[in-house]
Amino acid sequence: MTTTVAATATALLLAALAAGTWTGPDPAAARLRRLLRRGSTGPRSSRRWPTREALPSRRAAAWREASLELCQGLAAELAAGRTANEALVRVVSVMAFPDPMAGRTLTAAARDGGDVPVALLAVAPERGGEGLRRLAACWRASVTAGGGLVALVDRVAASLREAEAHRQDVAAQLAGPRATARLLAGLPVLGLLMAAGLGMRPLDFLFGGPAGTACLVLGIVLDGCGLWWTHHLVARAERD
């Protein structure tokens, strides 16, 4: 009975270690589910963004998607002949930003004749706000130099689409290393089960004395370090 309980505890500990290090789905799978939900939820205003407690990478992705949607909507409204402020108010009214205060800030600046570039910079987060910062620069250039805003917004939208396509390509290429790391994380559990099936009684050694306990602790620590380092490398590649 003691051996069975110890085996179960060891397997659960290793499985929890792997799951805790690699929580959440792959970025490619998350994007696919988001696209499927987008096609089935109807209007844009009903879309739900990740909460403030969501992972930073997911929240940054939500801001990038909102920035692209804002630029595309602005380009369409400006091409229809609306003024810049009117176009911004109309587009923001049918959008759902990750932070609801962002839409209110932009609407107030556009309706009250405020400084829209400053408002865009104020609501742009550090991660995922690149599109809003580019839009603010284009807006300011259009106001100061008198250039056509629609052409500038089109360029920003095109650059955001290219960047998103690049991120999806990187995520697809990193799906292999992620899957390999998850597989390697589960190999210790498989090794214990195979050894127990062959009658080697590995748990008697692991829990039977100081040497076995030291090997168990060292194995768990090395497994966790390997998972953390692989996750660090993958996350760094995605940021770059």
Image (spheres, rainbow, N blue to C red):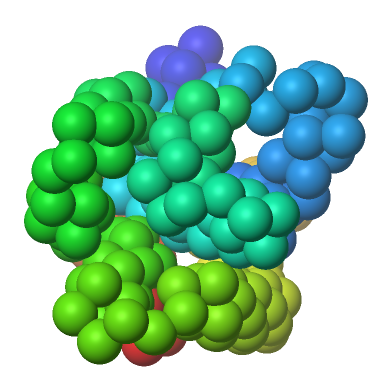
The one of 74 and 68 positioned closer to us in this rendering: 74
Q: Position of residue 98 (x, y in %)?
A: 39, 34
The count of marks equals: 0
**Residue 26 appears in the picture as rendered:** no
Up the image or down, 128 lies above or below 30; here it is below
The one of 216 and 12 positioned closer to us in this rendering: 12
The one of 144 and 12 positioned closer to us in this rendering: 144
Q: Position of residue 228 (x, y in %)?
A: 31, 66
Residue found at the far top of this picture = 1
In percent of the image, x 50 and y 26: which residue is there?
A: 93
188 horizontally vs 215: left or right: right
**Residue 108 appears in the picture as rendered:** yes
238 horizontally vs 72: left or right: left
In percent of the image, x 20 and y 60: which residue is there?
A: 117
Q: Quadrant of the C terminus?
A: bottom left
Q: Position of residue 57 (x, y in %)?
A: 38, 55
The one of 43 and 58 positioned closer to us in this rendering: 43
Location of residue 195 by image quarter: bottom right
Q: Position of residue 115 (x, y in %)?
A: 13, 52
170 horizontally vs 207: left or right: right
In percent of the image, x 31 and y 49: which residue is there?
A: 56
In percent of the image, x 63 and y 55: which residue is there?
A: 81
Location of residue 43 by image quarter: top right
Location of residue 138 by image quarter: bottom left
